[in-house]
């Protein structure tokens, strides 16, 4: 009798251990089964909607790219804390993407904001590529619709399945707090941040930084002001120009402290400092503006405690900074935009998978 009881207890114990695991499996299976299935046709429809909205505000393409980065800090979840100073200015991109979200949902496309914003970063980058309306060499004799509908994105096949955060409001805002990289960061800090946050290699960090070829900075958002690359280059997604300007001896950089004391006019120091390197060409025309963290992918330097500038000269014709271990990668990208784009796609896909439990590749 005792042996029968003992066997019963063993069977009961094993069953109790199995059922919780089975329950978890069934719940997961139901979630997967109920998840939306995004089709390639729906993806193309979303792309076109994003293009239509960017057309009315072409300078905001770069802000949408920035939104995709900021959303993926802490995990891509379709939620932004607009009260975080690092996210200042992203409300304009969110407004654009929310209009797209409303349209595609009304068309019966079931998609999370996190997936939509990841697509947005792709479409916004595409809009500035060669042959597209934001590119410096765009052939305006062609109709806009013909160009964008014929566009074949060079990004890899999209993977969907990102889940929005629970704390978001109906339009994608949240109070969740995340830590963002500083414009004062040096080489080690830039690389460490991106390795820990996104799992990037150093070269992938260099590649993702190339997005700074697009758009500019606004005082109200960050205390910094000016386009990374001026003129027609501002809205062109060509990383080779960004990388080249930091290492080509024809460009001279001057240090500018943008934040000053309202009473004395003296430059603010420490974390309040807003150091900027402005580039001029051989004709003394200002052609770009770069952060300390931009040069951190080129040189390995310490950052001054007070001014927050690099503690060495960054101008390429007479640099005193030590080349970073990624210097050769910068040179390679400066010589070959296609090489950079290939690396950028890889880094972007890795970044926009941050925090996702499972992603599914689009079916044709």
Image (cartoon, rainbow, N blue to C red):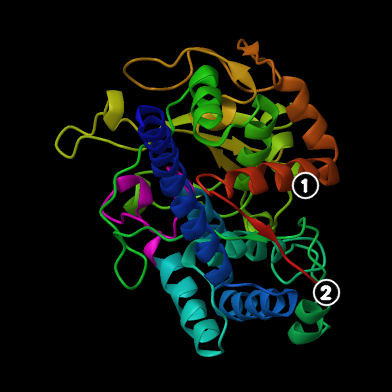
Based on the displayed image, in which of its 4 quarters is residue 346 positioned? top right
What residue appears at the point 31 percent right and 54 percent down from the top-left corner?
Answer: 81
User: Per the image, is 283 magenta?
Assistant: no
| Name of the residue lying farthest toward the left | 263
Q: What secondary structure predominates along the stretch shown in magenta?
A: loop
User: Per the image, is 72 magenta?
Assistant: yes
Q: Which residue is mark 1?
A: 341
Report the span colored magenta: 71-91
What residue appears at the point 64 percent right and 43 percent down from the top-left corner?
Answer: 350
* Comes first in the chain, label 2 or label 1: 2
- Crowd tier of the residue under label 2, counting other residues whose Cα lies within 10 Å: few below 14, some 14–19, many 20 or above: some
| Name of the residue lying farthest toward the bottom | 107
Based on the displayed image, in which of its 4 quarters is residue 215 positioned? bottom right
- Crowd tier of the residue under label 1, counting other residues whose Cα lies within 10 Å: few below 14, some 14–19, many 20 or above: many
Q: Position of residue 27 (x, y in %)?
A: 46, 59
Q: The C terminus appears in which quarter of the rendering?
A: bottom right
Q: Position of residue 45 (x, y in %)?
A: 67, 81
Q: Nearer the viewer, residue 15 or 161?
A: 15
User: Which label belongs to residue 77?
Assistant: none
Q: Which residue is mark 2?
A: 139
Q: Nearer the viewer, residue 68 or 128?
A: 68
Q: Position of residue 221 (x, y in %)?
A: 35, 52
What residue appears at the point 50 percent right and 58 percent down from the top-left corner?
Answer: 26
Q: Nearer the viewer, residue 319 or 165?
A: 165
Q: CA distance from mark 2 to mark 1?
A: 22 Å
Residue 300 located left or right of residue 328 = left
Q: Nearer the viewer, mark 2 or mark 1?
A: 1
Residue 362 located left or right of residue 2 = right
Question: What element does badge 1 sit on?
Answer: helix
Q: Is residue 359 above or below residue 170?
A: above
What residue appears at the point 80 percent right and 64 percent down from the top-left corner?
Answer: 137
Residue 294 located left or right of residue 220 = right
């Amino acid at each position: 009798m005792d042996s029968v009881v003992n066997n019963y207890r063993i069977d009961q114990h094993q069953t109790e251990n199995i059922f919780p695991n089975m329950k978890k499996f069934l719940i997961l299976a139901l979630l997967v089964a109920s998840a939306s299935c995004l089709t390639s046709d729906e993806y193309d429809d979303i792309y076109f909607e994003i293009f239509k909205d960017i057309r009315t505000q072409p300078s905001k393409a770069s802000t949408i790219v920035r939104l995709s980065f900021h959303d993926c800090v802490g995990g891509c979840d379709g939620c932004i804390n607009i009260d975080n100073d690092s996210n200042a200015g992203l409300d304009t991109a969110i407004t654009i993407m929310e209009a797209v979200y409303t349209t595609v949902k009304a068309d019966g496309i079931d998609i999370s904001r996190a997936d939509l914003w990841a697509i947005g970063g792709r479409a916004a980058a595409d809009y500035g590529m060669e042959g597209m309306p934001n590119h410096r060499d765009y052939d305006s004799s062609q109709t806009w619709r013909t160009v964008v509908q014929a566009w074949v994105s060079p990004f890899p096949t999209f993977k969907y399945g990102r889940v929005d955060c629970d704390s978001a409001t109906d339009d994608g805002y949240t109070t969740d707090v995340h830590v963002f990289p500083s414009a004062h960061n040096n080489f080690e800090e830039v690389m460490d941040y991106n390795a820990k946050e996104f799992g990037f290699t150093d070269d992938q960090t260099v590649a993702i930084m190339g997005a700074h070829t697009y758009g500019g900075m606004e005082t109200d958002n960050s205390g910094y002001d000016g386009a990374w690359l001026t003129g027609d280059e501002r809205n062109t997604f060509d990383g080779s120009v960004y990388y080249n300007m930091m290492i080509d001896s024809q460009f001279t950089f001057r240090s500018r402290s943008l934040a000053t004391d309202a009473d004395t006019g003296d430059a603010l120091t420490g974390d309040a400092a807003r150091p900027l390197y402005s580039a001029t060409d051989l004709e003394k025309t200002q052609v770009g503006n770069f952060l300390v963290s931009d040069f951190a992918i080129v040189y390995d330097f310490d950052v001054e405690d007070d001014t927050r500038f690099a503690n060495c000269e960054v101008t390429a014709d007479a640099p005193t900074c030590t080349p970073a271990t990624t210097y050769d990668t910068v040179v390679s990208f400066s010589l070959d935009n296609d090489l950079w784009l290939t690396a950028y796609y890889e880094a972007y896909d890795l970044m926009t998978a941050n925090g996702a439990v499972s992603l599914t590749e689009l079916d044709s």
